[in-house]
Amino acid sequence: MQQQATLWTKSFIFLLIANWFTFMSFQMLIPTLPPYMEELGGSKTQVGLVTTLFSIGAVLSRPFIGHLLQSEARKKLVLIGSLSLLLITTLYSVTSVIFVFLLFRFVHGLGWGWSSTTNGTAAVDLVPKRKIGEGMGYFGLSVTIGMIIAPSLGIFLFQNFNFSVLIMTSAALGIIAFILFSITNFTTPKEVQKRTFDVKSFSFFGSMIEKPSWFPAVVSLLNTFGYGSIVTFIVIFGKEQGIEHIYLFYLFNAVFATISRPITGKLFDKRGPWIVIIPCSLFAFAGMWTIALADNFYYIIAAGILFGIGFGSMMPAFQAWVISKTTQERSGIANGMYYSSIDLGIGLSALLLGIISNSFGVSTADLFKLSSVCFLFVFALTIWDYQRNKHLPWNEASET
């Protein structure tokens, strides 16, 4: 992590915009691929596999890219990831065979694991260490702003046009992202430049887990497990309940995350992750129950507001927490572990909840209630960590 004093450099701004388009392209498909699988004749379990196989692919690719990030230039890796996402996105429209579609989803996960890890690490390299919470908060905001438009646009295209139009639009956004990455100046830390790639030193588990950062990564996994039920089932839930304008959840989620992000980022830098995560986990818990009880779009709006403040604020706080516990040359591995915790949480949630729904006939609303418990675990574990470290200043506690 560079020791430069300025956060808002030209390179950082270009990276934020390019990452925004990457996530717009990606987020368009998140709420639409599960119901498309249902239209193809897939079962609830297969609908869950749309998310699970993607997550498995992402988790499998991240240890390798984390190892590469210890010795390779950032720009080359970022461009490879961006191009791979663009290519696999275009393949979704060429098949309606469930097995092939799921195979494409797995390959997409491999590309996403590569791209998200390299983009996040490139951002860390551009952010001053003393502003890591604020900087990664704004980097996460590039994701959030994409969420304002992309899921709503994706659902609109899915419901009003054919699937090919959805894919072509997603691919067009991916092309814009690739062009922007191409003109961005990236920084590769000196410690990384001095190292050379050695495949013999690669260890899958050694490059998957950054031991000093394991605790916030595990809590982040629980956090995203709770959110995974929404990612997979909210559009289906809207159909079951006859609720129109389900996209309003994503819209208000993103807007209120945008509003709260500058505040929570600065709070993190001054007082650590606990001041952000403890109250926000309760906001997310309340948001989950608001969705579960929804019978009109006003509940959906309220849930989006609660999640925007809660879940939207927690995710960059978790990333900054993970990064704060590692060294500069290991930041790629720590970033990979953080993103893997997200994918594992969402993927396991989609699979297990899909199986529960199929096997026991549990309603989608009850799936939301069941997964809400994860946010209570996040609340309890973060309080426990605070009690363990509250006697230390935040900059010292972050090293323990």
Image (cartoon, helix red, strand yellow):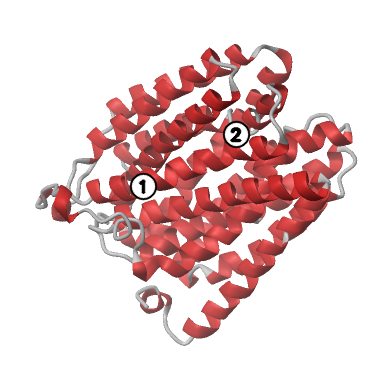
- Circle 1 residues within 10 Å: few <14, some 14–19, many ≥20: many
Q: Is residue 373 above or below residue 111?
A: below
Q: Secondary structure at mark 1?
A: helix
C-alpha gap between disc 1 and disc 2: 20 Å
Residue flagged by tag 2: what amino acid is it?
Ile
Q: Is residue 347 above or below residue 326?
A: above
- Looking at the image, residue 13 sits to the left or right of residue 157; the answer is left
Name the residue that disc number 2 marks: 30
Please state the horizontal and vertical placement of residue 2, each as a whole percent of the image: 24, 55
Mark nearest the camera among 1 and 2 is 1
Label at residue 62: 1
Pointer 1 or 2: first along the chain: 2
Residue at image point 58% right, 12% down: 164
Indicate the quadrant containing the C terminus: top left, top right, bottom left or bottom right: bottom left
Q: Secondary structure at mark 2?
A: loop
User: Along the horizontal axis of the image, is 161 left or right of 389?
Assistant: right
Who is closer to the viewer here, 156 or 251?
156
Q: Nearer the viewer, residue 106 or 327?
A: 106
Q: Which mark is residue 276?
A: none
Q: Amino acid at mark 1?
A: Arg
Residue 203 shows in this picture: yes
The residue positioned 75% from the left and 53% from the top of the image is 287
The quadrant where residue 43 appears: top right
Residue 126 visible (yes or no): no
Q: Is residue 172 left or right of residue 235?
A: left
Task: Name the quadrant of the N terminus.
Answer: bottom left
Q: Give the residue displayed 68% in from the left and 38% down from the top.
A: 250
Which residue is at the front of the view, 1 or 72? 72
Residue 21, how many percent across, how many down?
47, 29
Image quadrant assignment for residue 207:
bottom left
Label 2 CA crowd tier, 10 Å (few <14, some 14–19, many 20+): some
